[in-house]
Image (cartoon, grey):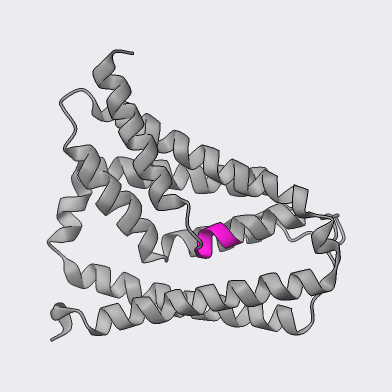
Amino acid sequence: MNASMATTFVTGLTLSLSLIVAIGAQNTFVLRQGLRREHVAAVVALCVLLDIALMTLGVSGLAASLGRHPRALDALALAGALLLAAYGTAALCRAWRPRALQAASPETARPLARVLTQALAISLLNPHVYLDTVVLIGAVGARQPAGMQGSFLIGAGLASAAWFSALGYGARALAPLFARPAAWRVLDVVIAATMWSLAVGLATGVFASPTLT
Protein backbone atom coordinates (compact mmCIF):
# COMPACT_ATOMS: atom_id res chain seq x y z
CA MET A 1 0.00 0.00 0.00
CA ASN A 2 1.55 3.33 -1.10
CA ALA A 3 1.36 6.60 0.81
CA SER A 4 -1.68 7.88 -1.09
CA MET A 5 -3.63 4.67 -0.55
CA ALA A 6 -2.67 4.65 3.13
CA THR A 7 -3.84 8.24 3.55
CA THR A 8 -7.14 7.47 1.85
CA PHE A 9 -7.56 4.33 3.98
CA VAL A 10 -6.99 6.32 7.19
CA THR A 11 -9.43 8.99 6.00
CA GLY A 12 -12.17 6.40 5.57
CA LEU A 13 -11.32 4.73 8.89
CA THR A 14 -11.32 7.91 10.98
CA LEU A 15 -14.38 9.44 9.33
CA SER A 16 -16.42 6.26 9.82
CA LEU A 17 -15.35 5.95 13.46
CA SER A 18 -16.13 9.59 14.20
CA LEU A 19 -19.67 9.11 12.91
CA ILE A 20 -20.45 5.65 14.25
CA VAL A 21 -19.08 5.98 17.80
CA ALA A 22 -22.11 7.73 19.25
CA ILE A 23 -25.10 6.72 21.34
CA GLY A 24 -27.96 5.82 19.06
CA ALA A 25 -30.73 3.32 18.41
CA GLN A 26 -28.55 0.91 16.43
CA ASN A 27 -25.70 0.97 18.95
CA THR A 28 -27.98 0.47 21.93
CA PHE A 29 -29.62 -2.49 20.20
CA VAL A 30 -26.25 -4.16 19.54
CA LEU A 31 -25.21 -3.45 23.13
CA ARG A 32 -28.36 -5.05 24.49
CA GLN A 33 -27.89 -8.13 22.29
CA GLY A 34 -24.34 -8.41 23.58
CA LEU A 35 -25.52 -8.25 27.15
CA ARG A 36 -28.13 -10.91 26.46
CA ARG A 37 -25.55 -13.04 24.60
CA GLU A 38 -28.20 -13.62 22.00
CA HIS A 39 -27.39 -13.97 18.28
CA VAL A 40 -24.47 -11.54 18.71
CA ALA A 41 -22.47 -12.73 15.69
CA ALA A 42 -25.48 -12.49 13.37
CA VAL A 43 -26.47 -9.01 14.61
CA VAL A 44 -22.90 -7.69 14.36
CA ALA A 45 -22.48 -9.15 10.88
CA LEU A 46 -25.80 -7.68 9.72
CA CYS A 47 -24.95 -4.18 10.99
CA VAL A 48 -21.50 -4.27 9.43
CA LEU A 49 -22.77 -5.52 6.07
CA LEU A 50 -25.50 -2.87 6.02
CA ASP A 51 -22.96 -0.15 6.75
CA ILE A 52 -20.64 -1.36 3.99
CA ALA A 53 -23.50 -1.61 1.49
CA LEU A 54 -24.80 1.89 2.29
CA MET A 55 -21.33 3.43 2.23
CA THR A 56 -20.68 1.82 -1.14
CA LEU A 57 -23.94 3.23 -2.49
CA GLY A 58 -23.01 6.66 -1.20
CA VAL A 59 -19.54 6.64 -2.73
CA SER A 60 -20.97 5.44 -6.05
CA GLY A 61 -23.19 8.50 -6.33
CA LEU A 62 -26.40 7.98 -4.35
CA ALA A 63 -25.49 10.90 -2.04
CA ALA A 64 -26.00 13.34 -4.89
CA SER A 65 -29.35 11.76 -5.82
CA LEU A 66 -30.71 12.04 -2.28
CA GLY A 67 -29.51 15.62 -2.12
CA ARG A 68 -31.85 16.43 -5.02
CA HIS A 69 -34.86 14.86 -3.24
CA PRO A 70 -35.11 16.43 0.23
CA ARG A 71 -38.72 15.29 0.66
CA ALA A 72 -37.56 11.66 0.58
CA LEU A 73 -35.23 12.38 3.49
CA ASP A 74 -38.08 14.11 5.35
CA ALA A 75 -40.28 11.02 4.93
CA LEU A 76 -37.49 8.78 6.21
CA ALA A 77 -36.98 11.08 9.17
CA LEU A 78 -40.66 10.95 10.17
CA ALA A 79 -40.75 7.15 9.85
CA GLY A 80 -37.59 6.93 11.92
CA ALA A 81 -38.99 9.27 14.58
CA LEU A 82 -42.07 7.08 14.99
CA LEU A 83 -39.96 3.93 15.23
CA LEU A 84 -37.59 5.45 17.78
CA ALA A 85 -40.50 6.66 19.90
CA ALA A 86 -42.04 3.18 19.85
CA TYR A 87 -38.80 1.49 20.91
CA GLY A 88 -38.30 4.13 23.59
CA THR A 89 -41.71 3.30 25.00
CA ALA A 90 -40.87 -0.40 24.94
CA ALA A 91 -37.63 0.27 26.82
CA LEU A 92 -39.51 2.23 29.49
CA CYS A 93 -41.93 -0.67 29.91
CA ARG A 94 -38.97 -2.99 30.44
CA ALA A 95 -37.56 -0.57 33.02
CA TRP A 96 -40.85 -0.71 34.93
CA ARG A 97 -40.41 -4.45 35.46
CA PRO A 98 -36.68 -5.20 35.06
CA ARG A 99 -35.24 -8.69 35.09
CA ALA A 100 -31.79 -10.00 35.92
CA LEU A 101 -29.44 -10.82 33.07
CA GLN A 102 -29.63 -14.41 31.86
CA ALA A 103 -27.63 -16.00 29.08
CA ALA A 104 -29.88 -16.83 26.15
CA SER A 105 -31.12 -20.39 26.14
CA PRO A 106 -33.50 -22.35 23.91
CA GLU A 107 -36.30 -21.53 26.35
CA THR A 108 -35.62 -17.80 26.68
CA ALA A 109 -33.88 -16.77 23.45
CA ARG A 110 -35.87 -15.05 20.74
CA PRO A 111 -35.81 -16.59 17.25
CA LEU A 112 -32.96 -15.45 15.04
CA ALA A 113 -35.35 -14.23 12.35
CA ARG A 114 -37.16 -11.98 14.81
CA VAL A 115 -33.92 -10.46 16.12
CA LEU A 116 -32.57 -9.82 12.62
CA THR A 117 -35.87 -8.29 11.53
CA GLN A 118 -35.73 -5.91 14.49
CA ALA A 119 -32.09 -5.06 13.70
CA LEU A 120 -33.03 -4.36 10.08
CA ALA A 121 -35.90 -2.10 11.12
CA ILE A 122 -33.79 -0.13 13.59
CA SER A 123 -31.02 0.27 11.02
CA LEU A 124 -32.92 0.97 7.82
CA LEU A 125 -35.66 3.17 9.31
CA ASN A 126 -33.15 5.38 11.11
CA PRO A 127 -32.39 8.40 8.88
CA HIS A 128 -29.14 9.03 10.77
CA VAL A 129 -27.78 5.80 9.27
CA TYR A 130 -28.35 7.15 5.76
CA LEU A 131 -27.06 10.60 6.60
CA ASP A 132 -23.87 9.16 8.09
CA THR A 133 -23.15 6.37 5.59
CA VAL A 134 -24.75 7.39 2.31
CA VAL A 135 -24.58 11.19 2.46
CA LEU A 136 -21.57 12.09 4.61
CA ILE A 137 -19.23 9.13 4.04
CA GLY A 138 -20.49 8.81 0.46
CA ALA A 139 -19.80 12.45 -0.32
CA VAL A 140 -16.26 12.33 1.10
CA GLY A 141 -15.50 9.01 -0.57
CA ALA A 142 -16.77 10.20 -3.93
CA ARG A 143 -14.24 13.06 -3.83
CA GLN A 144 -11.24 10.78 -3.32
CA PRO A 145 -8.69 10.59 -6.15
CA ALA A 146 -9.37 8.18 -9.00
CA GLY A 147 -8.56 4.61 -8.01
CA MET A 148 -8.50 5.43 -4.28
CA GLN A 149 -12.18 4.97 -3.47
CA GLY A 150 -11.65 1.27 -2.79
CA SER A 151 -9.06 2.05 -0.11
CA PHE A 152 -11.43 4.59 1.42
CA LEU A 153 -14.26 2.03 1.60
CA ILE A 154 -11.98 -0.61 3.11
CA GLY A 155 -11.00 1.81 5.88
CA ALA A 156 -14.59 2.87 6.51
CA GLY A 157 -15.81 -0.74 6.51
CA LEU A 158 -13.06 -1.83 8.88
CA ALA A 159 -14.07 0.91 11.32
CA SER A 160 -17.65 -0.35 11.27
CA ALA A 161 -16.58 -3.97 11.79
CA ALA A 162 -14.26 -3.07 14.67
CA TRP A 163 -16.84 -0.90 16.42
CA PHE A 164 -19.80 -3.28 16.24
CA SER A 165 -17.63 -6.25 17.22
CA ALA A 166 -16.29 -4.39 20.24
CA LEU A 167 -19.79 -3.25 21.19
CA GLY A 168 -21.40 -6.67 20.84
CA TYR A 169 -18.71 -8.84 22.36
CA GLY A 170 -17.32 -6.29 24.82
CA ALA A 171 -20.74 -6.08 26.42
CA ARG A 172 -20.13 -9.52 27.93
CA ALA A 173 -17.64 -7.99 30.35
CA LEU A 174 -20.59 -6.12 31.84
CA ALA A 175 -22.59 -9.31 32.44
CA PRO A 176 -21.88 -9.45 36.23
CA LEU A 177 -23.15 -5.89 36.62
CA PHE A 178 -26.32 -6.59 34.67
CA ALA A 179 -27.09 -9.66 36.75
CA ARG A 180 -28.86 -7.11 38.95
CA PRO A 181 -32.34 -5.91 37.90
CA ALA A 182 -31.52 -2.35 39.02
CA ALA A 183 -28.77 -2.13 36.40
CA TRP A 184 -31.22 -3.18 33.69
CA ARG A 185 -33.63 -0.51 34.89
CA VAL A 186 -30.96 2.18 34.54
CA LEU A 187 -29.91 0.91 31.09
CA ASP A 188 -33.48 0.81 29.77
CA VAL A 189 -34.25 4.28 31.11
CA VAL A 190 -31.15 5.61 29.34
CA ILE A 191 -32.16 3.79 26.16
CA ALA A 192 -35.68 5.22 26.37
CA ALA A 193 -34.40 8.76 26.92
CA THR A 194 -31.92 8.43 24.06
CA MET A 195 -34.50 7.11 21.60
CA TRP A 196 -37.12 9.70 22.53
CA SER A 197 -34.62 12.55 22.25
CA LEU A 198 -33.57 11.31 18.82
CA ALA A 199 -37.22 10.99 17.79
CA VAL A 200 -38.02 14.54 18.92
CA GLY A 201 -34.93 15.88 17.18
CA LEU A 202 -35.81 14.14 13.92
CA ALA A 203 -39.44 15.26 13.97
CA THR A 204 -38.49 18.84 14.88
CA GLY A 205 -35.98 18.94 12.06
CA VAL A 206 -38.56 17.74 9.55
CA PHE A 207 -41.22 20.29 10.50
CA ALA A 208 -38.63 23.07 10.47
CA SER A 209 -37.40 21.97 7.05
CA PRO A 210 -37.85 24.50 4.19
CA THR A 211 -39.25 21.68 2.05
CA LEU A 212 -42.43 21.70 4.14
CA THR A 213 -42.94 25.44 4.00
Q: Main secondary structure of the magenta part?
A: helix
Indicate the quadrant where residue 200 lies: bottom left
- Residue 195, how many percent across, how many down? 51, 74
Is 160 situated above or below 204? above
- Report if residue 37 is visible in the image: no
What residue is rendered at 72% in x and 58% in y? 111
In the rendered structure, the answer to whether residue 196 lies left or right of residue 169 reads left
Residue 177 lies in the magenta stretch: no
Quarter the N terminus occupies:
top left
Residue at the limit of the structure toward the top, as seen here: 2
Is 67 situated above or below 165? below
- Residue 137, how many percent across, how many down? 29, 46
In the rendered structure, the answer to whether residue 168 lies left or right of residue 98 reads left
- Residue 61, how many percent across, how many down? 18, 44
Residue 27 lies in the magenta stretch: yes
Quarter the C terminus occupies:
bottom left
In the rendered structure, which segment of residues is drawn in magenta? 24-28
